[in-house]
């Protein structure tokens, strides 16, 4: 009987708080629909790992290690980087790069909107994080969950839980975070700028060549990003080649769903009370907001800078769509444009910037790995 009650007697305040946090994540996922596919597995596994002596994670008993299934998932999927890379195949299969190819200038916004990554790194170092931890926190600014997990898995595994929660939660909060920043940096007249449709049609051959060409060029520029960009573009090639439709659909549905479940459960395995309930967790959550604000501001200000030299002005709100939160950010920009002028239609341009942000975030992650990996 005593052995059966060990779990109850060993329960402490930290365990109770973390069980409450896990329950709260599940609530947010169900009630507010904040990234439910990931936050529900994370929340539930957070509850599991904070049960004293839980068999779900590794436990040392009399000097013998008893492996837990969630710890095994973490070792197999996160440490080896398999889960984030498989997610990239699924994401690539979901993305249509056609709007970007129709409006190539949107590539610039996919780069400019990564400013938040590097600005947040600076702030994180000022708060006392070492350079690798700062890089892992800064990558939240990529607005790209898998990239955040990939970088944090290399540089700061002990921070993986709060970084992942911040990255995915703030992606869901893009409709709340971005509009105030955009309105603060633009005038009503700027938000009303219309973008003329180009009518350019991208043929199938170009869509097939694009993922192959991007993989080669991006990997030569940043070899550390080869796996990230390669898996993303491989997924897109499955979509565009036209001869693997069933595999493309499998990548978009079954593969995405299965890996997302395993990814969420693996991340939750790191959210034990001793790791999560620390002041640095609050810093990470706050820095996540900083990263998204800087991303949005960087994109908008870059568009305004371009307008100093362009005869046909660009709606500066499109710069904010250069973050990787696809397709939420594109929808936000389109809706803001429609509020200012119901006849303004920015969606295709915004989508082009948004998918450019997906490429930009992956490249930024690879550059960070290259710059920081040997420090």
Image (cartoon, helix red, strand yellow):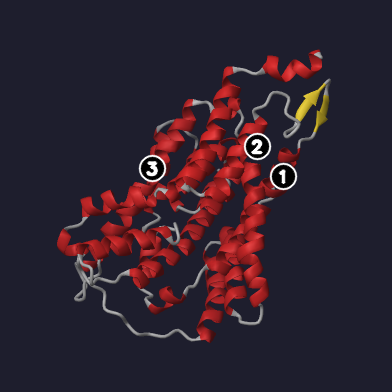
Image quadrant where residue 286 sits:
top left
For residue 17, say whether it is visible.
yes
On screen, residue 121 above or below 222:
above
Mark identifier at residue 269? 2
Furthest-front residue in view?
31
Image quadrant where residue 331 sits:
bottom left
Closer to the chain start, of discs 3 and 1, is: 1
Q: Are the two marked residues, 3 and 1, in contact with CB atoms closer than 8 angstroms? A: no
Q: Residues within 10 Å of mark 2 (few under 14, many from 20)?
A: many
Residue at horizontal 66%, vertical 51%? 81
Residue 373: x %, y % from top left: 57, 47
Residue at horizontal 49%, vertical 72%? 96
Q: Are the two marked residues, 2 and 1, in contact with CB atoms closer than 8 angstroms? A: yes
At mark 1, the secondary structure is helix
Q: Which residue is mark 1?
A: 73
- For this view, does 306 lie left or right of residue 115? left
- For this view, does 25 lie left or right of residue 104? right
Q: Residues within 10 Å of mark 1 (few under 14, many from 20)?
A: some
Image quadrant where residue 213 sits:
bottom right
Mark identifier at residue 289? 3
At mark 3, the secondary structure is helix
- For this view, does 210 lie left or right of residue 266? left
Residue at horizontal 38%, vertical 49%? 116
Residue 111: x %, y % from top left: 40, 61
Q: Quadrant of the N terminus?
A: top right
Q: CA distance from mark 3 to mark 2?
A: 24 Å
In the depicted view, which residue is nearer to us: 64 or 14? 14
Q: Are the two marked residues, 3 and 2, in contact with CB atoms closer than 8 angstroms? A: no
Residue 375: x %, y % from top left: 55, 43
Closer to the chain start, of discs 2 and 1, is: 1
């Amino acid at each position: 009987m005593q052995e059966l009650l060990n779990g109850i007697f060993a329960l402490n305040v930290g365990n109770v708080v973390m069980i409450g946090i896990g329950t709260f994540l599940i609530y947010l996922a169900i009630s507010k629909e904040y990234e439910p596919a990931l936050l529900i597995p994370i929340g539930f596994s957070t509850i599991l790992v904070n049960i004293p002596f839980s068999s779900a994670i590794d436990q040392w008993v009399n000097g013998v290690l008893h492996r837990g299934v969630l710890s095994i998932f973490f070792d197999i999927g996160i440490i080896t980087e398999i889960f984030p890379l498989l997610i990239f195949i699924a994401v690539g299969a979901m993305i249509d790069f056609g709007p970007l190819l129709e409006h190539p200038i949107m590539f610039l916004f996919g780069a400019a909107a990564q400013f938040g990554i590097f600005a947040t790194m600076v702030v994180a170092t000022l708060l006392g994080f070492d350079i690798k931890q700062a890089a892992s926190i800064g990558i939240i600014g990529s607005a790209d969950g898998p990239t955040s997990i990939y970088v944090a898995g290399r540089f700061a595994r002990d921070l993986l839980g709060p970084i992942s929660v911040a990255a995915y939660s703030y992606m869901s909060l893009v409709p709340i975070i971005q509009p105030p920043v955009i309105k603060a940096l633009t005038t009503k007249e700027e938000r009303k700028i219309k973008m003329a449709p180009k009518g350019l049609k991208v043929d199938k051959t170009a869509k097939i060549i694009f993922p192959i060409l991007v993989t080669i060029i991006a990997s030569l520029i940043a070899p550390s990003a080869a796996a990230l960009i390669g898996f993303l573009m491989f997924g897109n090639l499955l979509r565009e080649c036209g001869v693997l439709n069933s595999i493309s659909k499998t990548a978009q549905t079954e593969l995405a769903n299965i890996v997302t479940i395993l990814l969420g459960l693996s991340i939750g395995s790191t959210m034990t009370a001793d790791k999560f309930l620390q002041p640095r967790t609050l810093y990470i959550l706050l820095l996540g907001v900083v990263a998204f604000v800087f991303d949005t501001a960087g994109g908008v200000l870059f568009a305004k800078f371009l307008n100093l030299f362009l005869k046909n002005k660009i709606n500066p709100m499109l710069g904010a769509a250069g973050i990787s939160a696809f397709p939420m950010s594109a929808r936000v920009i389109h809706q803001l444009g429609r509020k200012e002028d119901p006849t303004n239609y920015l969606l295709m341009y915004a989508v082009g910037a948004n998918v450019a942000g997906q490429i930009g975030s992956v490249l930024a992650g690879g550059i960070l790995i290259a710059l920081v990996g040997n420090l």
